Image (cartoon, rainbow, N blue to C red):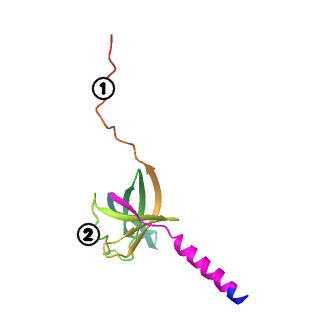
Amino acid sequence: MLKATGVILATVLFLGAAAKKQYADGTIVDIQQKTTTRVLYYQVDTPITQNDPYYEISVQIKDKVYFGRYTPMHASDSLPEDWTVGSAVQARIDGRHLVLKRPGGTEMSFTFTKAAVTKPELSGPATAPAGK
C-alpha cells in the first residue's frame, strides 16, 4: 500500500513538471517607461504625491502580440539593457503573467494586460482588376 502511494506520488510530480509551459521565441515590439502618481498623504487639504515608474512591454510570438506591465521594486531598477525594440527574447504566458527570460537565464514576470492578433502582411503588390 505504501509502495503504491509512492508510485502515484512520483507519477503526479513527474506529470506536474512536464506540464510546465515551455518558452517560445518572441520579438520585443515596443517598450515604454511611464509613471503613475500616487498619493502618499494629505497635509491639511493638499495631497502629497509621489511618481512611481513602471514599464509597458509588447512581445510578438508568432501571430499574436502580448502586452505586459512591470512595476520595479525601486525607482532606480530598470529592464535589461539588451532588451530593445526588435530584440529576440524567450517568452511564455503563465496565467496572468507574461514571463520573459533575461539574458542571464533568470525570469522576469510582467502582469499580462492583453493580447492582440497581428494582421498578416500582403505578400505581393495589390493589383486592380482588369477593366473592359
Q: Is residue 43 visible?
A: no
Which residue is nearer to you in this view: 83 or 62?
Answer: 62
Q: Which residue is mark 1?
A: 127
Q: Which mark is residue 4?
A: none
Q: How many marks?
A: 2
Q: Which mark is residue 81?
A: 2
Instruction: Report, in whole angstroms, how far the alpha carbon at label 2 lies from the one at label 1.
Output: 44 Å
Q: Write down the region rendered in magenta.
A: 4-28
Q: Main secondary structure of the magenta part?
A: helix
At 40% from the left and 70% from the top, the residue drawn is: 71
At 41% from the left and 50% from the top, the residue drawn is: 63
Say left or right for 37 vs 82. Answer: right
Residue 47 pos. (x, y %): 43, 69
Task: Say which amino acid is labelled 2.
Answer: Glu
The image quadrant where one finds the C terminus is top left
72 inside magenta stretch: no
Image depth: mark 2 or mark 1 in front: 1
Residue 25 pos. (x, y %): 37, 61
Considering only order in the chain, which callout, 1 or 2, is on the residue closer to the N terminus?
Answer: 2
Task: Say which amino acid is labelled 1.
Answer: Thr
Q: Is residue 99 visible?
A: yes
Which residue is nearer to you in this view: 78 or 37?
Answer: 78
Residue 27 pos. (x, y %): 33, 58
Residue 95 pos. (x, y %): 53, 65
Say left or right for 120 vs 6. Answer: left
